[in-house]
Amino acid sequence: MHITRVRTVLTAPDGIALVIVKVETDQDGLYGVGCATFTQRPTLVAKAVEDYLDPLLRGRDPRNSEDLWRLMYHNSYWRNGPVLNNAISGVDIALWDIKGKLANMPVYDLLGGKCREAALVYRHADGRDPQEVLDQVMRHRDEGYLAVRCQMGGYGGRVQDIRPPSAIPGRAAPQATRRAAGLDRADSAFPGSYYNPDVYARSIPTLFEHIRSAIGFDLFLLHDIHERLAPIDAIRMAKELEPYRLFFLEDPLAPDQIEWFRRLREQSATPIAMGELHNNPLEWRLLIAEQLIDFVRAHISQLGGLTPARKLAALAEAFGVRTAWHGPGDTSPVGHAANLHLDLACHNFGIQEVIRFGEPLYEVFPGTPELRNGYLWANDKPGLGIDIDEAAAAKYPIETPVIGWTQSRWPDGGLWTP
Ligand code: GCO
Ligand code: MG
C-alpha cells in the first residue's frame, strides 16, 4: 500500500480561508483528509504541501504515521514554525483518517475509545457594552449551552481602525472613559487596530460583575485576554476576576513570556488556559511540568496534527492539566472533527471551543460534527467521519487581503501582540 499523491484544497465557505489536505493512496477509493488551516497565510501552506511534502511522501506506506511525522518534521532541517507545521498537521490528520478507514473504526477508537459520549463546548458572546454581552450570554444559555466565553468589543476591548488623517480613536468606544479618550487623541501616522489596554483591563471585571449578578453562577464563563495586556496587568486582572469563578482565563501572557506564568500562578487562583500559539514542546513543557496552567489549548492543525497532540494530552494528564483544544472559525470542520476525536478519547479532556457551523460549511464538509444540548457529537463513522465535497468547495474561493486586525496598537501608536 502506498501514497500516490498529497494535495491541498483551499476554500472559504464562511469567508475564512481554510486549507484542507487530501492524501490519496493506490487502494481503491482510500484517501484521508486533514486540516492545515493557517488563515493568515493559506497559500504558503499549500505551497509547502505541494512542492515539498507531496514528492517526499509519494510511494510511502500511509500506515506508518509515526515514522512519516518525524520524516516530514526533520526533512526541512529547520523546524518548529507555522506554515511547515500546518502542512505537516494536514498530512498527519489525513493519515489518521486513513488509518481509521482501514481499521473500519472511528479515530477515537484507535486513540483508546470513548471516555465520554460527547464533548462539552463553549460558545462566544461579544457586545459593545455589558448588557449587550449579557443578552448574548442568555441567548446561548436558552439554546442549551453550558459555557460561554465573554468578550466586550473583541480582543483587547473596543478596537478602532485608524487611517490617517482622521485619527481620533476611542471616543466611539462605549466603554471608553474620558481618560481613555484623552490618551487616544493623538493623530497617528501608523494605520492599525487601536485599543486601549487600560480601558480594556478595567472594563472586564465590570463586565463579569454585570453578568454574574444577572444570571448567578450556574453557567461556565470564560474570557480570552489574547495577550493584549502588559504581564503585570494580566496578573491584576486574574486576581480581580477571582470572585466571578471563571472556567478559565485564556492567553493572559504571550508565549514568549513563559516565566511570568510563575508569578501569575503565585498570585491568583483563576484557572489559566494557554497554548493556541504553541508550535513545539519547548513552549509547553515547562508550563505543564510546573503546573502553571490548568488547560492546554493547542491548535492541532498548528502543532503538527494528532500525532503530537495525543502525546501532549498524555503529558498534560500526568500533571493534572486538562485539554481545551483551540476551535475558532479558522479551524476547518475537519480540524474540529480531529479535536473532537481526541476530546472523546482523552480522560483529561476539559472543554472544547467551537463555532456554529453555517450551512455552507455543512455543504462543503459532509459529516461535520453536530452541536446538540451544549455538546459536540461525532458521527461514529470510520476514520474522522468527515469528507470534503470539492465541487462545493470550489464555489467558495479564498481571498488573501493584507491582515488588519493583527496590526494591533496601543494609544500612542506602538505595536502590541495581537
Ligand atoms: C480563540 C482565538 C482565535 C484567534 C484566531 C487567530 O481563542 O478563539 O484566540 O479567535 O484569534 O484563531 O486567527
Ligand atoms: Mg484565544
Image (cartoon, helix red, strand yellow):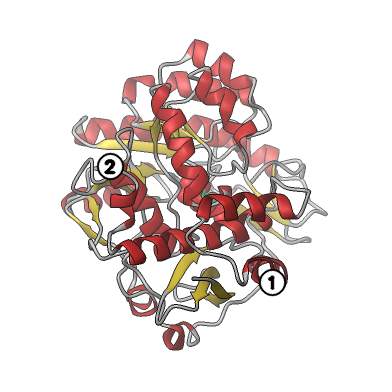
In the displayed structure, would residue 373 be above or below residue 97?
A: above
The picture places residue 190, in percent across and down from the top left corner, at 79, 53
Q: Nearer the viewer, mark 1 or mark 2?
A: 1
At horizontal 23% and vertical 40% (from top left) the residue drawn is 115
In the displayed structure, would residue 330 be above or below residue 217?
A: below
Callout 1: 10 Å neighbours few (<14), some, many (20+)?
A: few
Residue 388 in view in this figure: yes
The picture places residue 124, in percent across and down from the top left corner, at 37, 50
Q: Residue furthest top?
A: 266
Which numbered tag is attached to residue 55? 1
At horizontal 54% and vertical 62% (from top left) the residue drawn is 90
The picture places residue 225, in percent across and down from the top left corner, at 52, 37
Where, by quadrant of the figure, is residue 357 drawn? bottom left
Q: Amino acid at mark 2?
A: Ala
Chain-order first, disc 1 or disc 2: 1
The picture places residue 228, in percent across and down from the top left corner, at 60, 38
Measure how far apart labels 1 and 2 are at the Cα level. Answer: 44 Å
Element at badge 2? strand
Q: Is residue 338 left or right of residue 274?
A: left
Q: How many marks?
A: 2
Callout 2: 10 Å neighbours few (<14), some, many (20+)?
A: many
Mark 2 vs ligand 1: CB below 8 Å: no
Where, by quadrant of the figure, is residue 197 drawn? top right
Element at badge 1? helix
Q: Nearer the viewer, residue 96 or 1?
A: 1
Name the residue tied to disc 2.
Answer: 147
Q: Nearer the viewer, residue 86 or 132?
A: 86
